[in-house]
Amino acid sequence: PLNVGIHAAEIYIPKKFVNQTELETFDGASAGKYTIGLGQLNMSVCDDREDINSICLTAVNNLLEKYEIDPATIGFLEVGTETIIDKSKSVKSVLMQLFAASGNHNIEGIDCKNACYGGTNALFAAVNWLESGYVEEGKEWAIVVAADIAVYKSGGARPTGGAGAIAILLGRNAPIVFDRGLRSTFMDHAWDFYKPDLHSEYPEVDGPLSNMCYIKAIDKCYEGYLDRVNKLENRKANMSVADYYLFHCPYSKLVQKSFGRLAFNDYLRNTATFEVPESIKEHPNLTRESTYVDKNVEKAFMDVVKAEQKAKVDPGLLASRNCGNMYCGSLYSGLCSLLSETPAETLAGKRVVLFSYGSGLSSSMFSFTVQTDDAAKAALNRISAALRVADRLAARTKIEPKVYDEIMALRQSVHNAKEYTPISSTKDMFPGTWYLVDIDGMFRRTYKRA
Ligand code: ACO
């Protein structure tokens, strides 16, 4: 087998963040709504010095440098984002600046768009490319970038914003190998979240519908994933199929609900190994379709998985809880959190299931298995040392909610601007961060590195 998978990963966490408890007070929301109700601690903020191009430049440049990757050896690079600042020119084409010095212009791949799912499409495309006959000797690496700046207009959705960029190096004979054949996809037409107004950075969002669509996608993808496992591995699988679960995370409470939902699915599939809650036994005719917003079902199964969630889900939520929704980057920030904070010895031999959701809607469930040989452990140690997610979160600068509000107003007023020089300072950025220098009269953007 080619053992296609992940060799390295880098995450860009913006330096500025706002605290969710402080935001509750500032917004006049009841205490605990964002922190307990949504399960969020902090939220990343990008001012007018940062856009989708700059955060992707940062992630890819740091990936190349930290892992000493020769840019000439990259054969594929694709970007997943929904932060659209140009209807034609791709982010990928902007990233080609990082390869110019090496003379490498022979790199397949372009941008993928559908809400928070583009990164997963890019990842699948990279895996497919690596499995194909188009890989050339000496150019055997693929890079996938999953990034967004997630912002909402003032109101209930605003605390579920965030920002971040992840760049992943993929190749053959990887320490983290995708489980070949184990992919399940659910796509449908829904108006839960979309961005029809190109004059605005903000989406149109039907929050309750988006939550419902997400839960439905969990059901569909999980069912398809388990059916594939049962077929390929000839067994009757349940949620014990994986040692860790990574979810697209708009806010971490939804992930807790989703993990409980897997248990509900096991119950419906008659594969549950847990004691069925009394409140569920009282309603023997429950179906998936009748329970998308059923609070009794939601709570009962969240309780069932409470202990397991700490072990299998929480390790993947560190960045999400502290940076917020990175849209396309969200699921892969989970990957970075897990790989950053879990010792190689613990990860070796483990299977990790990933669930990707993009409104509109597109969703997939798939998995990888961490290899157990010494080379794999060495690679995992290197990845963990490069990522240092907890350290980086601790090194950030907290801004006041009022300043956050001003930054949002500024971003709003300069969206689509031309002949514009950003006014925010470039002083407080992590070293190696790319930033916007100016936008000229023909909308052309130039960037520099801190
Ligand atoms: N203490 C503890 N919990 C509280 C408190 C409090 N003081 N106040 C409210 N809560 C709880 C609520 O009970 C609710 O919990 P529940 O969902 O378990 O019932 C939770 O906090 C949220 O409260 P709501 O009143 O439902 O919040 P609101 O309607 O303002 O918005 C929403 C929530 C819909 C998620 C909104 O933030 C939103 O639209 N976000 C963007 C859309 C989104 O992220 N969708 C997810 C999938 S699609 C995607 O990735 C974009």
Image (cartoon, grey):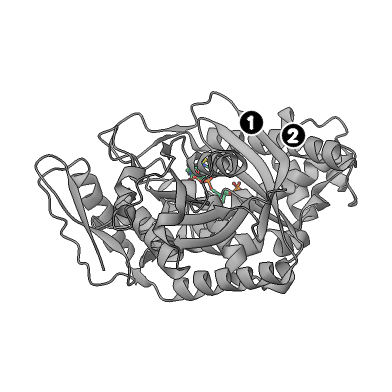
Among the 4 quarters of the image, the one containing residue 212? top right
- Examine the rendered structure and indicate whether residue 54 appears above or below residue 212: below
Q: Where residue 65 sits: x, y (%)?
A: 41, 67
Q: Are marks 1 and 2 in contact (CB under 8 Å)?
A: yes
Amino acid beneath label 2: Gly
Q: Nearer the viewer, residue 349 or 417?
A: 349
In percent of the image, x 71 and y 64: which residue is there?
Answer: 310
Residue occupied by mark 2: 224
Q: Nearer the viewer, residue 421 or 406?
A: 421
Q: Where residue 21 sits: x, y (%)?
A: 45, 65
Question: CA gap, disc 1 to disc 2?
Answer: 9 Å
Question: Which secondary structure, mark 1?
Answer: strand
Residue occupied by mark 1: 186
Lateral position of residue 274 relative to residue 70, left or right: right
Lateral position of residue 379 relative to residue 261, left or right: left
Amino acid beneath label 1: Phe
Mark 2, residues whose alpha carbon is within 10 Å: few (<14), some, or many (≥20)? many
Question: Which secondary structure, mark 2?
Answer: helix
